[in-house]
């Protein structure tokens, strides 16, 4: 990598840091005053702006060297001596290391003129950073001009009457380089990269004539880069690499420079099962400089849920103890409605049956196992559901028991709820009722939405997947297609339903808090295992 005036920064998803390299300038791009001929540098009505041999500041980039090139259709703008905007009347027909731009108008009165490159969709000093960007193959930057790459330069008159300029790029560039060691994901394709920000990163902006920087009040906070082309890349970019590789799936996105907190969603698709979903990464606020590109490496080794946390209420061991799906003698069904009749029953020798204790009406009945003592009680769970701003997400990918799945719900973290004054172990969300001693015979359905988390919100929530449940010999409800989540609380129902305990239930259509027979095989796991804190 060439180091000419390059700046370095660290910005990676794993450590929320990675490498940033500033683009080198092109100091010897001579511009000559012409005298005759439209396609000849001697045309008396044209000024010829000559892009020199050191192609470092053009409009597509060579990642390995930092060099830039002019591309087919590129044009520049200059204000002439009359203050009239003039666009070059020619453009490269293909990728060029140097090119002679021919600009109409008079350029006699000044020794310096501002040169503008507003991108292929821009005009004069107006630049549009596109919210919908597209890249046809890995490590290819042909889309820069359409996406909003832009720049300015001061063209200075030379002793021979020519002008020289060095284009200063005004956008920031994110270079996504996902990788995975997950064999399930290695058969998938990257179909798009979705970036959301806590402030504007896409809009129409003005190139400031003094600083060259992008100015104006933007409103666009999301950019989607589609990573599909033709032939080899019809389905998207491959994910066969176990370490960062810009040649395998490097994807480039143009954004407005500035300090942004970003949420990145990598969209993956398995064309065998036709499952498409996302892996979400959240970045803390960081200053993305103009004229700089950032290596956004990301390990897409998504969350795996081992299938060992289905329990009857307060049982000593899990529902399929010693016969889990990945054991030597598996009983545990992993596919819906494929029964196994070795499910726990009263007197189970493997310690899989529920705790049958019932001390009486209105008497607190705490669990005895360390696991169930570690999960939220009924009071706490109501705060998560009512004050946790529940968001159902049908796209977030995860794996369990050897299968790729998606679907689940985002809830505010315990620390966030506590900071907002919306959490109590001793009382439910109404601030009065202790559900451990006061019966709530009928459940309730808190409000929830399908609104995606914003970049500013992403670090405040944790994710509960739709892991399904066991009812007798049957497995049901995993993932989005039949997706449902069932999670125990540590609280029994203190009324005449002597074998009931509280739980939560959710699908894409409903969120519910209720009580049910303790003999169901629901998830019992501390929320800290899911990212709560």
Image (cartoon, rainbow, N blue to C red):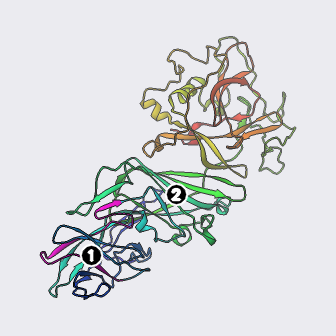
Q: Is residue 198 shown to the viewer in this render?
A: yes
Q: Which numbered tag is attached to residue 193?
A: 2
Residue 216: in magenta span: no
Residue 121: in magenta span: yes
Tell me residue 10's x, y (percent): 40, 62
At horizontal 50% and vertical 38% (from top left) the residue drawn is 533
> Quarter-wise, where is residue 185 in the image?
bottom right
> Quarter-wise, where is residue 123 in the image?
bottom left
* Gap in angstroms between the C-alphas marked 1 and 2: 32 Å
Q: Which numbered tag is attached to residue 176?
A: none
Name the side, left or right, on which 491 lies relative to 116. right
At horizontal 41% and vertical 65% (from top left) the residue drawn is 19
Q: Which residues are magenta?
A: 98-127
State yes or no: discs 1 and 2 in contact (Cβ < 8 Å): no
**Residue that extends furthest to the left in the rendered view of this protein:** 109
Residue at which label 1 appears? 166
Q: Nearer the viewer, residue 484 or 346?
A: 484
Name the side, left or right, on which 414 lies relative to 302. left
């Amino acid at each position: 990598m060439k180091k000419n005036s390059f700046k370095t920064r660290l910005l990676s998803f794993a450590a929320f840091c990675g490498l940033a390299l500033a683009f080198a300038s092109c100091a010897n791009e001579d511009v000559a005053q012409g005298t005759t001929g439209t396609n000849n540098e001697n045309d008396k009505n044209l000024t010829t702006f000559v892009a020199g041999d050191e192609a470092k500041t053009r409009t597509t980039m060579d990642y390995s060297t930092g060099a830039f090139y002019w591309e087919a259709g590129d044009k520049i703008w200059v204000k002439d001596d009359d203050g009239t905007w003039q666009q070059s009347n020619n453009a490269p027909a293909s990728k060029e290391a140097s090119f002679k731009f021919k600009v109409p108008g008079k350029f006699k009165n000044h020794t310096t003129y501002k040169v503008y490159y507003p991108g292929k969709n821009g005009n004069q000093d107006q630049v549009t950073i596109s919210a919908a960007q597209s890249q046809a193959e890995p490590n290819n930057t042909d889309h820069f001009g359409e996406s909003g790459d832009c720049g300015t330069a001061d063209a200075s008159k030379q002793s021979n009457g020519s002008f020289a300029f060095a284009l200063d790029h005004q956008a920031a560039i994110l270079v996504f380089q996902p990788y995975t060691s997950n064999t399930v994901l290695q058969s998938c394709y990257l179909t798009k990269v979705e970036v959301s920000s806590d402030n504007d990163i896409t809009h129409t902006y003005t190139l400031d004539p003094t600083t060259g920087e992008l100015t104006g009040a933007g409103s666009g906070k999301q950019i989607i880069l589609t990573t599909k082309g033709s032939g080899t890349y019809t389905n998207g970019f491959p994910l066969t690499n176990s370490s960062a590789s810009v040649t395998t799936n490097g994807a480039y996105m143009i954004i407005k420079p500035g300090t942004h907190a970003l949420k990145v969603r990598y969209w993956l698709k398995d064309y065998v099962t036709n499952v498409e979903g996302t892996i979400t990464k959240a970045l803390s606020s960081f200053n993305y400089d103009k004229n700089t590109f950032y290596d956004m490496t990301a390990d897409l080794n998504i969350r795996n849920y081992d299938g060992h946390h289905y329990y009857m209420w307060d049982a000593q061991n899990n529902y399929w103890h010693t016969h889990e799906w990945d054991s030597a003698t598996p009983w545990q069904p992993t596919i819906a409605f494929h029964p196994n009749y070795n499910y726990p029953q009263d007197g189970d020798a493997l310690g899989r049956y529920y705790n049958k204790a019932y001390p009486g009406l209105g008497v607190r009945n705490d669990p005895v196992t360390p696991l169930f003592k570690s999960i939220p009680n009924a009071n706490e769970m109501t705060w998560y559901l009512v004050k946790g701003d529940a968001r159902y997400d049908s796209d977030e990918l995860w794996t369990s028991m050897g299968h790729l799945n998606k679907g689940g719900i985002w809830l505010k973290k315990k620390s966030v709820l506590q900071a907002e004054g919306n959490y109590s172990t001793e009382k439910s969300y109404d601030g009065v009722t202790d559900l451990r001693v006061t019966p709530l015979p009928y459940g309730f359905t808190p409000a929830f939405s399908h609104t995606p988390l914003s970049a500013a919100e992403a670090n405040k929530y944790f994710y509960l997947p739709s892991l399904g449940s066991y009812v007798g010999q049957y497995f049901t409800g995993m993932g989005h297609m039949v997706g449902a989540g069932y999670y125990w609380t540590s609280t029994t129902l203190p009324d005449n339903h002597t074998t009931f305990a509280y739980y939560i239930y959710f699908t894409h259509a409903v969120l519910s808090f209720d009580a049910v027979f303790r003999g169901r095989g629901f998830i019992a796991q501390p929320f800290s295992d899911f990212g709560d804190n």
